[in-house]
Amino acid sequence: MSDLFTRLTRLYTGGLTRPAPALWPDPRTRTIAQFKPAAVLVAITDRPTPGLLLIHRPETMRAHPGQVAFPGGRIDAGEDAITAACREAEEELALPRAAVRIIGPADTYRTGSGYEITPIIALIPPDLPLRPNPAEVADWFEAPLDFVLNPAHHQPRDITVDGVQRRFIEMDYQGPKGTHRIWGVTAAILANMAARLDWCAAPAHKPRR
């Protein structure tokens, strides 16, 4: 068992057993009576400096074109959230289920589009030979966990839609492939995870020698 898996499991267990912090909501959900279940895989790479696997949706998609997202989608009949998240990651990136080490589900997130998303935190080996499915994934990248779980990078932004002002979280990650705008549901889930795990305040991970 890797040191990182042990550390993440300890932070996860401690964070989920404490009273819930102030989690980032989507206020549009107040008028929605029923939600469709979905799941995403929060895949953390097992490196001395861990990363988080994220994808860009194709610009041609009807919903959320071009946005940064986690691998994931709807939970099919007969599936649980873990099975659905792993299936979607395999369909979208050819990420083998056998390579995924589950840590556990994070706080669910309800969206204004009517989905209740269960994020599944997991550890994966680094440098897997991922193959994006072009119908669902335009590209993928890895952002440092130290960046995406750092509250200092979670910048609140305001937008007015149909005369109603909404506030959302945004992060701009400058990586080898350019700048990636992480916002909306993906950023909110990460902000909620940061509040639970307190990653940046925990002792730094030191790989075994």
Image: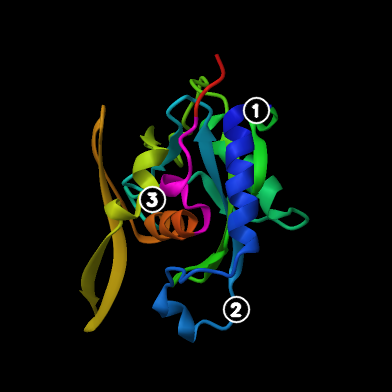
Residue lying furthest right in this view? 78
Q: Position of residue 191 (x, y in %)?
A: 41, 58
Please determine whether, in this image, residue 149 is positioned above or below residue 111: above
Considering the numbered disc 1 on the image, is that residue within a helix, a strand or a loop?
helix
| Residue hosting label 2 | 34
47 in magenta: no
Which mark sits nearer the N-terminus, 1 or 2?
Answer: 2
Residue lying furthest top in this view? 209
| Residue hosting label 3 | 61
Which mark sits nearer the N-terminus, 3 or 2?
Answer: 2
> Is residue 194 shown left or right of residue 108?
left
- Specify the segment rendered in magenta: 196-205
Q: Which residue shows up at 50% across the image and 68% down it?
A: 21
Q: Which residue shows up at 28% across the image and 57% down it?
A: 170
Residue lying furthest front in this view? 203
Q: The residue under label 3 is which amino acid type?
A: Met
Camera-near label (3 vs 1) is: 1
Q: Which mark is residue 190?
A: none
| Residue hosting label 1 | 99
How far is mark 1 from mark 2, CA to CA?
Answer: 34 Å
Q: The residue under label 1 is which amino acid type?
A: Ala
Q: Position of residue 187 (x, y in %)?
A: 38, 55
Color scheme of the displayed model: rainbow
Local packing at callout 2 (Cα closer than 10 Å; few below 14, some 14-19, many 20+) is few
Is there any visible trace of residue 103 in the rendered image? yes
> Is residue 149 shown left or right of residue 43?
left
Q: Are marks 1 and 2 in contact (CB under 8 Å)?
A: no
Q: The residue under label 2 is which amino acid type?
A: Gln
Task: Please name whichever residue, 147 or 131, is drawn nearer the observer in this view of the structure.
Answer: 147
